[in-house]
Amino acid sequence: GDIARRVFTLVGLVVVLVFNLGIYWVLGVQIISSALVIAYKLVYISDRFKHQPVFVMKDAKLLKTLLKFSLWALIVSVIEKAMINLAPSFIGIVYRDAVDYALQITVFNVAAQFFYYVNEIAIVFSGLFIAKIARMRARNATQEEFDALYVKAGRYQMAVLLLLVTLFAVLGQSLVTLWLGPGFEAVYYVGLLLITPSLIVGPQIVLNTMLSAQNKVKYRAFVYLGTLCLDVALTFLLAHSWGALGAGIAYFVSCFVGFGIAGNMVLSKQLGVSISHFLKSAFLPMLLPACSAVLIGLLMTLVPLTGWIALLFKGVILLFAYGLPLWFFVFNPAEKERFNVIVDGWNDKTRSYLHEHLINQK
């Protein structure tokens, strides 16, 4: 559903720009695509699980609790989408060049696609731990157990997210040039500004799930509201002169101040987790493979290779430059064992699929 929404949004924005339909249609495309996906999810869940939505609640106390929780969750959800989705509209409103604003909007929207993909991966990894958090909450797990889960989940998330950020930092410029051609160089810089905060926001998803499980989502909403206000103010200030790049800087600074500083302070106070311990255990060790990949990437710039095949080749080299230090110097034995179990599970599923669909057909 989310992939379909992004494809629909991208196609819709291209149509809006080609036919010069105006700023309001840019926002309209976002609203229409989101509404269609919500309707699809409602129909799918109703059909798949044979449950119909309940719109009438007789338990007044439960209804009040659900409404409060839903209100704060709605605020968080709206702000999450608004910080990225409203930026093109702000660029169109405040950018100084009335002729060039369409290009700036296109640059930001294309760069935002990289953000969406990285964000989806962060959400998927966090979703793996939601059920475990619920079980731990139900049996009144200790604070030490929650801290251990946060670090364990964070190490996997940080390894993947830092890999994605490193790959884009090293190869993103070549990718943008091959994909879009000359004139869109700013997409790389805006994309890097948008995806780098995932290193802050991604690991927080597990903690935000803990907040929701304890019915403290309003504290998260306060952080998001403050971050949005800062983002809007900086976007209007910076996008006037720098367009998409200014909006990217505004998002980066807002996430660092709002989520990185204020958000971590709130999470630490409300959940009792140690952010400094997380940084020492999950973030700092991952800098070794990241630095290794960046160093190899810098050396590869000395080799005059261009084109898609060369880009793919460089990507494979960077994966090894990142993965080998990660495996031998960062991952502990338990993490290596879990990785092997996952790989074995994939191999078993692959063999089962091939046996069922290819061998049996013969």
Image: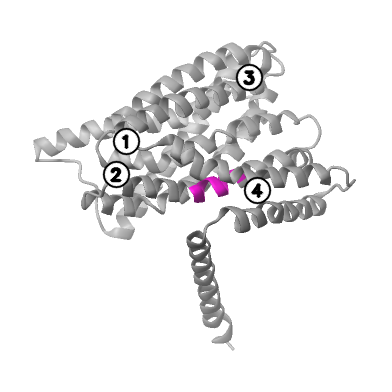
Q: Closer to the N terminus: mark 3 or mark 4?
A: 3
Q: Position of residue 110 (x, y in %)?
A: 64, 35
As measured in the structure, the alpha-carbon distance from the residue carrying label 4 to the one carrying label 2 is 31 Å
Q: Looking at the image, is mark 2 or mark 3 nearer the viewer? A: 2
- Residue at image position (63%, 29%) is 108
Q: Secondary structure at mark 2?
A: helix
| Badge 4 vs badge 2, beta-carbon distance below 8 Å | no
**Seen in the image, is 28 located left or right of residue 190?**
left
Q: Residues within 10 Å of mark 2 (few under 14, many from 20)?
A: few
Q: Position of residue 274 (x, y in %)?
A: 39, 37
**Seen in the image, is 64 located left or right of residue 82?**
left
Q: Residues within 10 Å of mark 1 (few under 14, many from 20)?
A: some
Q: Closer to the N terminus: mark 4 or mark 2?
A: 2
User: Residue at label 1?
Assistant: 272
Magenta segment range? Answer: 155-162
Which amino acid lies under the numbered mark 1 shown in the image of this protein?
A: Gly
Q: Closer to the N terminus: mark 1 or mark 4?
A: 1
Q: Closer to the N terminus: mark 1 or mark 3?
A: 3
Determine the main secondary structure of the stretch shown in magenta.
helix
Which amino acid lies under the numbered mark 4 shown in the image of this protein?
A: Pro
Which amino acid lies under the numbered mark 3 shown in the image of this protein?
A: Gly
As measured in the structure, the alpha-carbon distance from the residue carrying label 1 to the one carrying label 2 is 7 Å
